[in-house]
Image (spheres, rainbow, N blue to C red):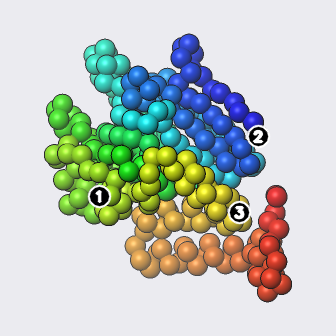
Amino acid sequence: MTTTTTASAVSEEVLLRHDEAGITTLTLNRPRQYNALSQALLADLQNTLDALAEDDSVRVVIITGSGQHAFCAGHDLKEMRSHVDPAYHQALFEQCSRMMLTINRLPKPVIAQVNGIATAAGCQLVAACDLAVAADNARFATSGINVGLFCATPAVPLSRNLNRKQAMHLLLTGDFIDARTALAQGLINQVTDIGDLPLMVRRLAETIGKKSPLAVKLGKEMFYKQLEMDLEAAYRYASGVMACNMDSEDAREGIDAFFAKRQPRWQGQ
């Protein structure tokens, strides 16, 4: 077991990293600011995710927040308000969007471990992750509208998780929904007691970590690409991916292991 910490140029360690048995946990570490996404934290997330993309020893990534009250409260409004240059705000939102896209394109699954409120860009972060497990005290909102700021960038992954009317209700009202409602609407996968949350997420990560790395990588990439295609194009693309996967050493090993009633031995393990 190894534990490493990444930190921004400022003294505060805004992002913590823990590695164990192929699972990397990234903890947003600004508890006094409800783990808000400062420019420094976004930069640390981007750099760490870029490194994880190239690290074959990492099978699954977990993102969570410090403490038991907040997963992430979105952008740091004080930091944003301290700048009046429109170019700064444009660069900030592009920086955040780039980080969210990196999660989407990361060749390994990312699980949100939602340990408290997730608002605005924090709700966006939950929606951007491949899977999400929430504590029963978690609440979700796109609350920018309450301060005169429509959550435009959070609307992108939110509208791809929820149906349109549910997404628009959140975006136009700024209302909170609880974890059970978020589960029913498709924003998260599971709800559990706050005390059981790390164990539940760990079990999920371990289950995925036992699968073929190649199949998981191909599958994640294929899943998001086909969502943007029409039905016929999606089937054509999926057929090519499946044929490629079938011709891989992992697929041959997996099928042979199935018939031999033994555990498969994946490439790279």
Q: Position of residue 27 (x, y in %)?
A: 54, 35
Q: Position of residue 51 (x, y in %)?
A: 67, 38
- Residue type at the position of mark 3: Lys
Q: Nearer the viewer, residue 32 or 251?
A: 32
Q: Tell me the distance, in whole angstroms, between the alpha carbons under discs 1 and 2.
A: 37 Å
Left or right: where does residue 21 sit relative to residue 187? right
Residue 227 image position (x, y, % from top left): 43, 66
Mark sitting earlier along the chain (1/2): 2
At horizontal 44% and vertical 59% (from top left) the residue drawn is 190
Looking at marks 3 and 1 on the same chain, the residue that comes earlier in the sequence is marked by: 1
Which of 2/45 is in front?
2
Q: Secondary structure at mark 1?
A: helix
For marks 3 and 2, give the CA distance: 18 Å
The circle drawn on residue 181 is 1
- Which of the two discs, 3 and 2, labels the residue nearer the N terminus? 2
Height in image: 51 above or below 242? Answer: above
Task: State the residue position of label 2.
Answer: 1
Quadrant of the drawing holding the N terminus: top right
Where is mark 3, residue-wise? Answer: 210
Q: Is residue 221 above or below residue 71?
A: below
Instruction: Say what amino acid the circle numbered 2 marks.
Output: Met
For this view, does 237 lie left or right of residue 231?
Answer: right
Vertical relation: 175 (above or below) 69: below
Q: Is residue 102 visible?
A: no
Q: Is residue 39 visible?
A: yes
Q: Between tags 3 and 1, which lies in front?
A: 1
User: In the figure, residue 9 lies in which quadrant?
Assistant: top right
Residue ID at (29%, 51%): 178
